[in-house]
Amino acid sequence: MPAIQCELGADGVLLATMDLAGKPMNIIDAEMAEALAALVERLETDAAVKGLILTSGKADFFAGADVDHLWGITTAQQAFDESMRFKGFLRRIERCGKPVVAAIHGRCLGGGLEIALACHHRIVLDDGAARLGLPEVKLGLLPGGGGTQRLPRLVGMQQALQWMAEGTEVKAAQALASGLVHALATSRDEMLAQARAWIAANPKPVQPWDAPKFRYPGGDSRSPAAVQMLAIAPSIASAKSFGNYPALTHIMSSVFEGGLVDFDAALAIESRYFAACVVSPESRNLIGTLWYQLGAIKKGASRPAAPPPSTVRRLGILGAGMMGAGIAYVSARAGIEVVLLDTSQSNAEKGMAYSQGLLDKAVKRGRRTPAQRDALLARITPTTDYAALQGCELVIEAVFEDRAVKAEVTRLAEAQLAPGAVFASNTSTLPITGLAEASVRPASFIGLHFFSPVDKMPLVEIIVGARTSDETLAKGFDFVRQIGQTPIVVNDSRGFYTSRVFATYVMEGLAMLKEGVHPRSIEVAGLQAGMPMPPLALQDEVSLSLGVHVADQTRKDLAAEGKPYVAHPGEGVLRQLCEIGRVGKKAGKGFYDWPAEGEPGEKRLWPGLGGLFPVKPEQPDQRELIDRLLYAQANEAARCLQEGVLRSVADGDVGSILGWGFAPFLGGALQFVNHVGPARFVERCRELAARYGARFEPAANVVALAEQGGRFEQGGPTPV
Ligand code: NAD
């Protein structure tokens, strides 16, 4: 089957249906590019063709570029040439002198939208599924098929910049209102009828930018409004990105410079910036991890091959507090019957009220109907009765972080469960193997570590205890996918993977404070490193008292195991603040003074910090601070891999980005080692170890990579 099937009607309208054989979505691969070239040729030369309707035979109009192909591009020249060649076809479509209409349904993204933008008229099927956008920035790229030039010429520079910088996908109504598309249709037949009518009425269309008196909506790069906006746009972008995402600057440059020259010159400018993005390390890091590694994980790379996929129909949740309530919501949202159990009926109902609150908001915003809300709520049963757990394929406990309480609920719940049912703990700190000692069926006991807030955090860390069976792991994995979250699988260990590595980031910030680094420099270094939140603010959010509690528990556990405990220099800082009641955000005071909940105002660094930790006169270079924050995490992640806590590089990278927001442009905590190069990583670690302590001694596996000239495995077109 050709990638584009053509059918010429008696009215001379060629209906071209894009439908790439063997692929779930249309993408611009070699086959599609060839088919597009042939289509353009026919449009130009076949006198019987009076006009063209471009549509899709898939569930969506078009997904975008072929990422495998982009990944294979090795030089900027190749990227430039290919982008120019593709745009050459699009330019021929819009200047062929015959009307071309894009009839769009479902998703129309990236290169697909760029094709549609080269059509003279765009109609969208308004069935709720339409999403139009240029999301290239999410993979560190910019639209290289004319998107940075056509979009601003249609919807104005400011709107276009905002959409491209954020990778926004707009729905049908907004696409129409903004001028991105010309008309909406209520059915496919109506859409095609509209397209034919438009073709009949517009035999000689000209694109707006090819018309002699073309003006940008809202002004071009020389207009006072645009000059003002473009003067501040880069600083707004870098206030968020700290210059870590070159694609953002390239998008702005392409739009601005393109607005100073004629359209064809503008297309060439765009291709130069596109080429710079394609070969940038940031883009390769993002694609390697958030496209390939994440894709492989979602397809089950870390799931045991047997048994066959399972689904949970009935789920038990013990503890209807913050975590239990969140897990109940995401599970009921996925269609699962949820038994939500707590010590009192009112506690259980309070947990259910969390779902009610979220759903009421969604109804108010028009995202859900009242009937959908009620159906979802009807799936949650608040109770205190353990007998209600009968028939559950999975029970997740989210009771207090206390071994005795957890042991008790394990015993009570297991008494109600059928043999194959799985019991999971959502503990954030207690080793799973130890908790499983309370279980009469430890092979069916597993850790499912959710993150807060559950409905916003996409990751679940699955923890395999010493006696957890493969079958239990597979069932846990399937459940996490069933509720639409991303699972990583780790072996049991103190702090598991995410909490352990995340702690090194925060603790390094605290150590700096102790050394006399200015607190604001520490916070800025965190953001410059690409972390979503600076270390001191983050510790306030997590709570300082929890940090002290975990340290005390660890010390006690290690002593019981006869192992030495090495205190991190940041630990003393936690204790000092806790001693004076500055225990974190919940108390309104920690490293910051926090405004009371619901009160206006911003958090402010506590002025008394300087008294406790005098700022030294000689402040370190900012790069040194950034490196410490990043190397501490990457080195600990490497140790997790070395010790077998991590089972794969992909889990380590994806888990770091989705779990605690490790700088995505670096591709994750392990990919960071590849990014700087293992040899340089080892060298820098040793410098830092000499200055700040043994915690920076490089992990043995990175030393081995450095010596052998290897790298951690990165995501790519071949399976991870
Ligand atoms: P929470 O205090 O908000 O909720 C705990 C709930 O468990 C309460 O509603 C309590 O009434 C109930 N409970 C206590 N004993 C019970 C019993 N015997 N039977 C039934 N219910 C009982 O706590 P949380 O923040 O939701 O944390 C719960 C678990 O999740 C803890 O193990 C915690 O370590 C873990 N966790 C928390 C976070 C987080 O960010 N808060 C993140 C990941 C994991």
Image (cartoon, rainbow, N blue to C red):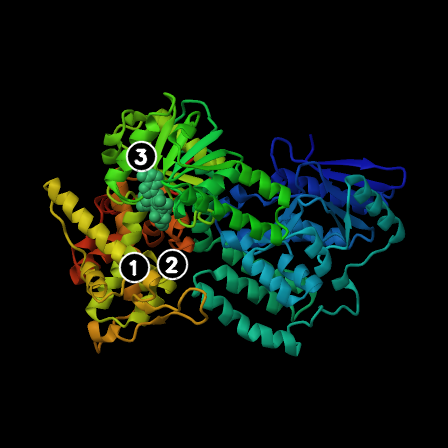
Residue, x 34% and y 26% (percent of image)? 470
**Tag 2: amino acid:** Met
Evaluate if marks 3 and 1 touch, with contact meaning CB atoms under 8 Å apart: no
Q: Which residue is mark 1?
A: 629
Q: Which residue is mark 2?
A: 531
268 to 15, vertically: above or below = below
As helix, strand or loop, the secondary structure at mark 2 comes to loop
Q: Nearer the viewer, mark 2 or mark 3?
A: 3
Q: Nearer the viewer, residue 646 or 77?
A: 646
- The circle drawn on residue 409 is 3
Residue, x 30% and y 25% (percent of image)? 443
Q: Residue furthest left?
A: 562
Q: Nearer the viewer, residue 657 or 572?
A: 572
Q: Nearer the viewer, residue 426 or 349?
A: 349
Ligand 1 neighbours mark 3 (CB distance < 8 Å)? yes
The answer, for residue 426, to whether it is visible in the render is no
Q: CA distance from mark 3 to mark 1?
A: 39 Å
Q: Quadrant of the C terminus?
A: top left
Give the x, y percent position of residue 128. Answer: 68, 45
